[in-house]
Amino acid sequence: AQSVTQLDSHVSVSEGTPVLLRCNYSSSYSPSLFWYVQHPNKGLQLLLKYTSAATLVKGINGFEAEFKKSETSFHLTKPSAHMSDAAEYFCVVRSNSGGSNYKLTFGKGTLLTVNP
Amino acid sequence: SAVISQKPSRDICQRGTSLTIQCQVDSQVTMMFWYRQQPGQSLTLIATANQGSEATYESGFVIDKFPISRPNLTFSTLTVSNMSPEDSSIYLCSVGVSGDEQYFGPGTRLTVT
């Protein structure tokens, strides 16, 4: 079984300040973890992924996430927010087991608001 | 990566009718998936559609309500049957390109009146 908990439904930051979107996961097997972004009326875009290589993962648009097995966390960060970062962000887990290949489980999402 | 298109992009339908959503990929892929995103909610997997086999449905979704076709490696359809207002959602298809990643179509926004 696998699950994802995004700890904040809404995060509001000022432009130029750091962004932290929190995600905890649960997985019976070694997981792959992803962050997707969904801009208003747009499709889902893959930001970054962790698949058992380096624990610090760099993605597009200056985002990065760190996989911490001891804390079962995969928080998304960015040093300086830009207005264009305002969107819904989804943390996603996939268990790497034979019975559930490719099945993704989505968190409930975090809405990021960036204030001028 | 893969480029995925969906038709229609949006539709308004009357209750009791059915709508078929098309998903087209620009390359051959083995696994395709259909998701539902209800208003203000996250994505929920409806079914996995592999070419040449019956679709595999997740708990809470049945073939009679959401029949799926997968005639070849670049195309799939999802039908939402006998619609009710509760079916108002965004329906998205996705494809598994590599061993880990899924790429998503732009979605079909369905409103049932």
Image (cartoon, coloured by chain):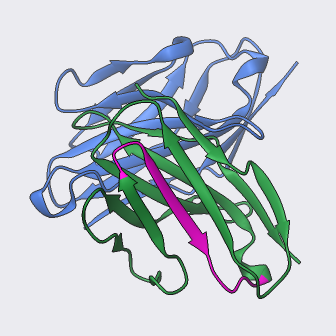
Shown in green, the chain is B
Examine the rendered structure and indicate whether residue A41 appears above or below residue B89: above
Quarter of the figure with the C terminus of chain B: bottom right
Is residue A90 magenta-colored?
Answer: no
Q: In which quadrant of the rendered image does the N terminus of chain B lie? A: top left
- Numbered range of the magenta stretch: B72-84
Name the side, left or right, on which B53 lies relative to A112. Answer: left
Seen as rendered, the residue at the extreme left is: A98
The answer to whether residue B77 is magenta is yes
- The residue located at (76%, 82%) in the rendering is B17
Q: Is residue A7 visible?
A: no
In this view, the residue in front, B52 or B104, is: B52
Name the spot of residue A44 as percent of width and height, x first: 58, 38
Colour assigned to chain A in the rendering is blue
Viewed as shown, does residue B92 lie left or right of B16?
Answer: left
Which residue: 70% across, 76% down?
B87
Residue at x 46%, y 55% (from the top left corner): B76
Judge left or right: residue A45 versus residue B112: left
Across and down, in percent, residue B46 comes to 47, 68
Relative height, residue B46 to residue B90 (above, below): below
